[in-house]
Image: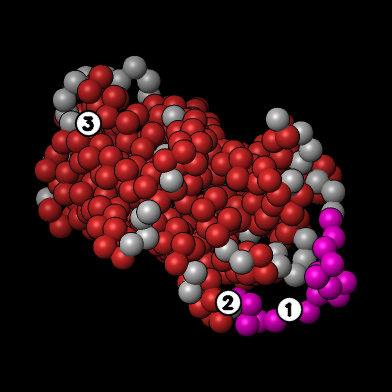
Amino acid sequence: MSILKGNTPWMLVAQVGALLGFAAYAVTLTTLQGEWGLSNFESGLIASAFFVGYIAVVPFATALTDQMDARRIYMTGSLLAIAGQLGMGFIASGFISACACMMVSGAGLAATYMPGLKILSDRAIQGEITRHIAFYTAFFGVGTGLSYVISGWILDLGDWHHVYRWVALGPACSLLIVLVLIQPTRHSHWQDNIRIDWRNIFPIRKWQQVLQNRNASGYILGYTVHSLELFASRSWLVAFFILSTQLSGEQFILAATTLAGVINFFGVPASILGNELALKVGRQQWVCIVMITSAFFGVALAYSMGHASWIILALAIGHAIFIMADSATLTAGLVTSADEKLKGAAMGLHSLMGFGGGLLGPAIFGFVLDLTGSQSDRVSWIWAYASIVVWGVLFVIYERRKGWVR
């Protein structure tokens, strides 16, 4: 398989490194809540601040990939990620400073995730590009899963500051991989002397052209609601396991942080196999099936809080599988349906909207927890999960009425 040759394996490893700090806040959330006296809404806002940083940078970073080798952008993003993680480990002391550091970390991911995909697409064989995309998006789950596990191990060995200090080594390794092992490439439409056009920060005209493509706009909206559910769930999953244990008095087979990481790994084959199934049943049809099923598992998982651990685990795994089963499909659908000259702008809008959903998700979840009762009330968790899965259901209803699904 060509995905096991050339640049792809190195970019997969680099992505894992870049994501090593992704779940550090989710792992330390309950600790920081107690130490800093945060409400659930404030805790969610800190998680959302990561996506604020992402959104602020991703349009500029991805638009520039149409003008220069994305490798240069990727290395800049790695430096930002390192700075954000070290800032959390050495500087953060409360809500405001934590939000600032998380925004820098999010900016780092913005300049690595989609530019990393562009590095692959610029170097991959055109006929096999969807499989490269499927593996790349699936390895997002590998990186986040390892982030949960490693962050949890570090937290068990020391205080929460050490978690952020050590995970900063991940993006440092990613920077070295791209610098040393990924060779520069040139395209005829790239200029030798890049002049930054600040209109590329928000290339509205290009985005309008992208959205005029009915297929592309559907995948972008789908990715938005997918990300809202995904990142809200990931931000609160460790807290869910901890509180479920407190309610039932029954211990899980693994620590909450390790368990969250292991469950995230189920999303990796789900994303890859989901893309293969989508090619057989139709991408749009597959996205709709997955979103409805994911919504069911999300609410059922919340309802299981405080019940037998095996029931919670089965539902958590099911939710992890279906929440990721359309991830590669949505991104591959966007890339293959976008005009070649607008691909960088399309990927930028796709990522901007997706992580815009990621920005809203954790804050909505925390707000609903506060609004409906407390973190220790199972009914509040049911409402919180319902508040993030309902968007996928509404998306399916809307797109079916608009004729996007064929």
Which residue shows up at 26% across the image and 49% down it? 389
**Mark 3 or 1, closer to the camera:** 1
Question: Which region shows up in magenta?
Answer: 185-202
Q: Mark 1 or mark 2, which has the lower sequence index?
A: 1
**Mark 3 or 2, closer to the camera:** 2
Disc 1 marks a residue whose amino acid type is: Ile
> Residue 137 versus residue 397: which sits nearer the camera?
397
Disc 2 marks a residue whose amino acid type is: Lys
Q: Mark 3 or mark 1, which has the lower sequence index?
A: 1
**From what the image shows, is residue 308 above or below residue 375?**
above
User: In the image, 291: left or right of 115?
Assistant: left
> Which residue is identified by label 1?
196
Q: Distance between the residues labelled 3 and 2?
A: 47 Å
Q: How far apart are marks 3 and 1 (CA)?
A: 51 Å
User: In the image, 365: left or right of 351?
Assistant: left
> Residue 30 versus residue 312: which sits nearer the camera?
312
Whole-percent x, y for residue 176 in the image: 77, 44
Q: How far apart are marks 1 and 2 (CA)?
A: 16 Å
Image quarter of residue 382: top left
Query: What's the colour scheme?
Result: secondary structure
Which residue shows up at 39% across the image and 57% down it? 222
> Which residue is identified by label 2?
206
> Which residue is identified by label 3?
244
In the rendered structure, find residue 78 and report the number of the disc placed on it: none
User: In the image, 298: left or right of 180?
Assistant: left
Determine the main secondary structure of the stretch shown in magenta. Answer: loop
Rate crowding at label 2 as few (under 14), some (14 to 19) or many (20 or more) other CA atoms within 10 Å.
some
**From what the image shows, is residue 396 above or below residue 24?**
below
